[in-house]
Amino acid sequence: METILKSAKKTVTIGPEKPIVLIGERINPTGKKRLAAALAKGNLEIVRQEAETQVAAGADVLDINVSIPEVSEVVLLPKAVRLVLETSDVPICIDTTNPAALRAALDVYKKIVPEGKPIINSVNGDEASLKNVLPLAVEYGTAVIILAMDDKGIPPTAEKRLLVVRNIIDRAEALGIPRADLVVDCLALTVGVDSRAALVTLETIRRVREEFGVNLTFGGSNISFGLPERIVINQAFLALAVYSGVNCPIVDVAKVRPFILSIDLLMGRDNYAMRYVRAYRKRMADTSLS
Amino acid sequence: METILKSAKKTVTIGPEKPIVLIGERINPTGKKRLAAALAKGNLEIVRQEAETQVAAGADVLDINVSIPEVSEVVLLPKAVRLVLETSDVPICIDTTNPAALRAALDVYKKIVPEGKPIINSVNGDEASLKNVLPLAVEYGTAVIILAMDDKGIPPTAEKRLLVVRNIIDRAEALGIPRADLVVDCLALTVGVDSRAALVTLETIRRVREEFGVNLTFGGSNISFGLPERIVINQAFLALAVYSGVNCPIVDVAKVRPFILSIDLLMGRDNYAMRYVRAYRKRMADTSLS
């Protein structure tokens, strides 16, 4: 099953046999003080910079999240979307829990790129989320990320996460959203608190792929929360998550792309290591220029 | 099934439910010019240093390979074994293809540590190897690493590697070697040449674990041969190999231990991340001291 995302100039195909698609996570003020402070002043310059640098680093899609307490997302999100579309030519992932901001962003998006197809991040099993988000995905013809959680939080077992996902898929399909447009994030609890956290997520990933055939993303580094050298844990988990079925993770592209390309290579999706070697040479050339 | 290795003071248990056991690879002149040159002069000082630093870095077992063209292994290997036993207190892995050197090393070993139990690296499906190595494992009561290859090389498919492994296990068991003392290395071809190389090895690992129940090692970085930034590929592969069943890889311990500890953590073998955090703190303390 293939999920197609489109910008004005680029089409990105997410599928089990395809190389891993990287969604750039850095346009997001969570844990980023400088970006949060700039956004609070309505300054979007860092958003523009992050769009550029992430695409230069190999991002296939850009996630856009500008949620901060100080400024209305209904105002800020459409502005950020417009700026990213002006700056880069990759498909986007509109990341908000605010339905009015989502609609405003989709409006702007469709005016600028009438033939484009973004992905919404995200819907979950909470009734309010289902009622707010899914109709917008239908109306604007977008793909949508499903979070394996509901108003009671992230279920502790794979079995229960699957139930939540099944319910959301049913609701989406009942509204006419094709399954190929649904991408699931199985989520993770913190492994420092619950030693089975990663195993449960990996099991959920395998079973969601098996039972529903959908594509899978994984966002956030919740798995390593509270621990030192989180990047080591996050990369190790990414390897296992991709091996288990995740094929469009939301990541810090500049940091993890070499690792991700090596996984594509190991999984037989890079004949004669052409892509791996080309990316290495480009990185070396960029380093010697800077 | 648990494989027990013993030195004079330490017992190391390799098992599917146990944390990953790290076999230190650095006492090996392959690709190490300085060590090879020192060994050619009969100088074992680097061997002593590597034994110390690898154990300090967290090696559970030390591989000892001193094969160079200039000096007789029958002379050098027992000396190296003696020196490592004097320097460190972890179990050892005697790594040679020379049966006379293997016997000489085992003789010295048993004199110094009568109650010890080392592991031999390795036997393969070649008739000469089977006839030379397995009787020594019986005579000296050692564990032994089985390579999934024979005189015709590394078979290209999982199916054929399993056949080779089954044959070697049968021969070992017929001589009275308990299966728990057999540890299999499924080997890997080079992914830059054959894009399915890693997938075939991972499939072999899963099936060997499933069909024979034995513990699994993985040595060598053949998988990334000829490619740039091999450590990235090697670590990604290590994550997938361990997830598939490898539980005592032969590695550069100082380089990969943090990554390996994060995999143990993710696989539910490190409650509250105690081991991960303790190792991090020790590394930080060592760094600030040096």
Image (cartoon, coloured by chain):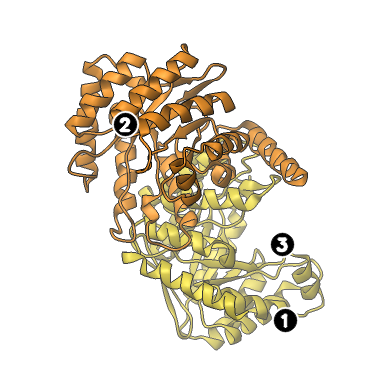
Chain colours: A orange, B yellow
Give how far across and how far down residue A83 sits, in percent: 52, 28
Vertical placement of residue A99 versus A8, above or below: below
- Dot 1 crowding, Cα within 10 Å, few <14, some 14–19, many 20+: some
Mark 1: secondary structure: helix
Identified at 46% across, 49% down, the residue is A32
Give how far across and how far down residue B244 sits, in percent: 42, 49
Subunit that carries the residue with mark 3: B
What is the distance, in whole Å, between disc 2 and disc 3 at their CAs? 44 Å
Query: Which residue carries the number 2 mark?
Result: A210
Instruction: Identify the mark at residue B45; answer none if there is no mark.
Output: 1
Question: Which amino acid type is marked by label 3?
Answer: Thr
Query: Which residue carries the number 3 mark?
Result: B30
Question: Which amino acid type is marked by label 1?
Answer: Glu
Mark 2: secondary structure: helix
Nearest-to-viewer mark from 1 and 2: 2
Identified at 33% across, 39% down, the residue is A205
Q: Is residue A171 left or right of residue B78?
A: left
Question: Which amino acid type is marked by label 2?
Answer: Glu
User: Counting residues from the N terminus, which is met first, the one under dot 1 or under dot 3?
Assistant: 3
In the picture as drawn, the residue positioned furthest to the front comes out as A41
Subunit that carries the residue with mark 2: A
What is the distance, in whole Å, between disc 1 and disc 2 at their CAs? 55 Å
Identified at 40% across, 41% down, the residue is A219
